[in-house]
Image: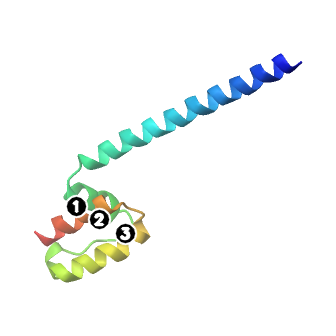
Amino acid sequence: MKNLQYKKITLILFFSITASVAIILNGCKASEKITTKSGAQLWAENCQRCHNTPSPSTFSHDQWETIGMHMQSRGLITNAERDKIVAFLKQ
C-alpha cells in the first residue's frame, strides 16, 4: 500500500515538474519574440489595437514618457516594450 502511494506521489511530482519546465520554456520563447520586435511593431500591435494612435509628432518627448507610463498599465506591456515604443515615438 505504501509503495503504491509512493509511486503516485512520484508520478504527480514528475508531471508537475515537467509541466512547470514546459511553461517556463514557452514563456522564454514569447519573450524572445518580443525582444526582436522594433518599437514601431510594438506600437502598432499594442497601441492601435484599442484606439487610433496619434502621430508621433503630436506630443513632446516628455509627454510621450508620461503617456508611455500610463498606457503601460492599461495595455499590460512590459517595461522593455514601453521603452521601445516610447523611443520610437520620440524619434
Nearer to us in this view, 15 or 10: 10
Nearer to us in this view, 57 or 12: 12
CA gap between label 3 and label 1 equals 12 Å
Please identify the quarter of the rendering in which residue 48 is found: bottom left
Q: Residues within 10 Å of mark 3 (few under 14, many from 20)?
A: some
Badges 2 and 1: C-beta atoms under 8 Å apart? yes
CA gap between label 2 and label 3 equals 6 Å
Q: Which residue is mark 1?
A: 84
Q: Earlier in the sequence, mark 3 or mark 1?
A: 3
Vertical side of 44 occupied by 57: above or below: below
Q: Earlier in the sequence, mark 2 or mark 3?
A: 3
- Residue 40 percent across, percent down from the top left: 20, 59
Q: Residue at x 23, y 75 (%)?
A: 54
- Residue 33 percent across, percent down from the top left: 30, 43
Q: Identify the residue at the far front of this view.
A: 2
88 sits left or right of 22 in the view: left
Q: Which residue is mark 3?
A: 72
| Amino acid on which the number 2 mark rests in the picture | Arg
Q: Residue at x 32, y 63 (%)?
A: 79
Badges 2 and 3: C-beta atoms under 8 Å apart? yes
Helix, strand or loop at label 2? It is helix
- Residue 91 percent across, percent down from the top left: 10, 68
| Amino acid on which the number 3 mark rests in the picture | Gln
Q: State the quadrant of the N terminus.
A: top right
Q: Residue at x 70, y 28 (%)?
A: 12
Residue 82 numbered mark, or none: 2
Helix, strand or loop at label 3? It is helix
Q: Exactly how many numbered labels are in the figure?
A: 3
